[in-house]
Image: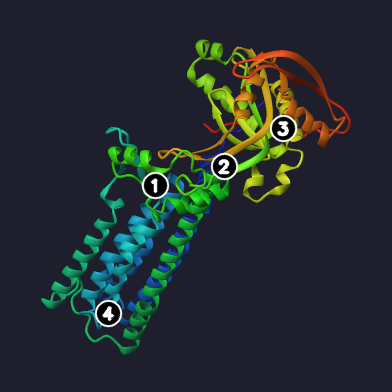
Amino acid sequence: PPPRDEPGPAEPEPQKLAKDGMSAAIKTALDSLRKSSLRRYQLIGLALCFFVCLNVAGGMITVLGGDKPILVLCPITYVVLCSTALAAEGCFGCKNLLANTHSFGVILLPILVNLGFGGFGNSGGVVLWGLTGPISAIALRSKHTVDVVDQSGAPEMFVRKSPLDRPLFWFLFSTAAAAISLVLEAAGVEGPDGDPGEVPLWFKLILTGNTVLGVPTLILFLLSGSGKDVEEGCKANWNLLCSIMPATVISELLAGSSGSSSFTQKPRDRNTMFKDINTMVPYSDCSRCRLGVSPRHLDCVTIAFADIVGFTVLCTKCTPLEVLKFLDDAFEILDWCTDSTGLTKLRTIGDGYLAVSGLKVAFGTPADGEAHAFRAAIFGLRALRLFGALVSPLGKAELRVGLASGPVVVGVVGIAQPQFDVVGSIANEAARMQQMCDPMQVQCNPDTYNLIQASNPDQLVFRRRSGVVMKNIGETQTYVLTSKKGNVELEEAYHHQPAKA
């Protein structure tokens, strides 16, 4: 604390605090408007509508003067309401407030203008702006208004939060508003300020031009903007799918799910499903495909199976949240090692991590087959090195890695949640290799060792183990990877990315 004879820091003035708070609010609003293409579409569409409204308001003031204030205030009211909604949505995160305000405004306010000018002709067909209301409500609304509910046990059921999220509501509302407008016009009902008298021809032309040019332009803009938003969503979905299985498999899976043949059609009920499974493909016919995805045979790949030591004890002594956090950190390390060495991650099984080297040969990348065993060994060394700095809730984390090389068949299995998988004896052999080695070691079978020596001789140091008895394999000889030598690079930069709350 400052000495008593010295004044402390001056209290900030209320005006300065208010100014700083307003600046922060404006900055927050602008940042939120830049976050997505949806906000950009809202701003551009709003600017178009503001231009039309101010143009019409200026013409009304010139023609009507101050005799019809309510009629003049109609387009200005739209500008004020939408500006307020935009500020509230940007500062306070009120989702869809701008879309709802715009949609109600372009449906209701043109009706008042139409009645105030004495009909469709005098107003230049301004009621046609109501056609953009339902399209705006659909195109400009946030896509985060649909939630998944599982109260009935059916994860495919969706619920919408309010009637404003339903396109049918906006269709019925705009239709009812247009019908009421026509009825009132036919009954000779005048606007809130009475009959405006004779409307000059030049002003009718301005109103008609705004309608003829503005309505199609806004509709075209909304449809193109909505299509762009859908395109970005499709790209995000495609990238997510590509992180699960190869792009070629995804393409075949999507083509097969279109129902182009009886084999790929989705069963309608459980009895039909089991009937189709029994008659779908004979076991001897490997040329047929599952869900449209053709199986691929690979003469030689290397499977890497990593397993966390002491995971069972960790699960019994720690909370599920702590275990999940630790698994996320551990698999982030293994994901980085997989990516940096060019392996293909298949899946995780509890605390087990399965990756394959040389798999991309089957999907148009021949270079992936070069030194696939050596790259799998580098994956194991990097994983062990990074795991040395990882701490579990019970202390130091340890890992075992098993490698096995040989032929496999890759394809998609299952109907519900289809799984991309590899089938072959080396998958079981890789799991046995990691089970029979000590913590913080990489163990491989003789085929993997011979491939490494053939592609990259004298770069890795192995220790041979003889007489190792493995389940379902018998007595065999294995090799433990102890260290590297030569110019093998293991020190690539790895940066931990903390998980978002």
Q: Secondary structure at mark 3?
A: helix
Which residue position is annotated with label 4? 123
**Mark 2 touching mark 4, by CB under 8 A?**
no
Q: Nearer the viewer, residue 130 or 368?
A: 368
Residue displayed at 55% across by 29% down? 348
Residue in view at x 79 percent, y 18 percent: 464
Asked if marks 3 and 2 touch (Cβ < 8 Å), the reply is: no
* Residue, far left: 187
Indicate which disc, 4 or 3, sits on the residue closer to the N terminus: 4
- Which residue is drawn at the image coordinates 17% and 74% (left, top)? 182
User: Mark 4 or mark 2, which is nearer the start of the sequence?
Assistant: 4
**Is 159 on the left or on the right of 422, as rendered?**
left
Q: Which mark is residue 243?
A: 2
Vertical comparison of 138 with 8: above or below: below
Q: Label 4, label 3: how many angstroms apart (C-alpha)?
A: 75 Å
Q: What type is the residue that disc 2 sits on? A: Ser
Residue to which mark 1 is pinned = 94
Q: Earlier in the sequence, mark 1 or mark 4?
A: 1
Instruction: Say what amino acid the circle numbered 4 marks.
Output: Ser
Is residue 180 toward the left or the right of residue 311 in the image?
Answer: left
Q: Amino acid at mark 1?
A: Cys
How many residues crowd around disc 2 within 10 Å: few (fewer than 14), some, or many (20 or more)?
few
C-alpha span from label 3 to label 1: 50 Å
Snapshot quadrant of residue 149: top left
**How dense is the environment of label 4, judged by Cα within 10 Å: few (below 14), some, or many (20 and up)?**
many
Type of the residue with mark 3: Ala
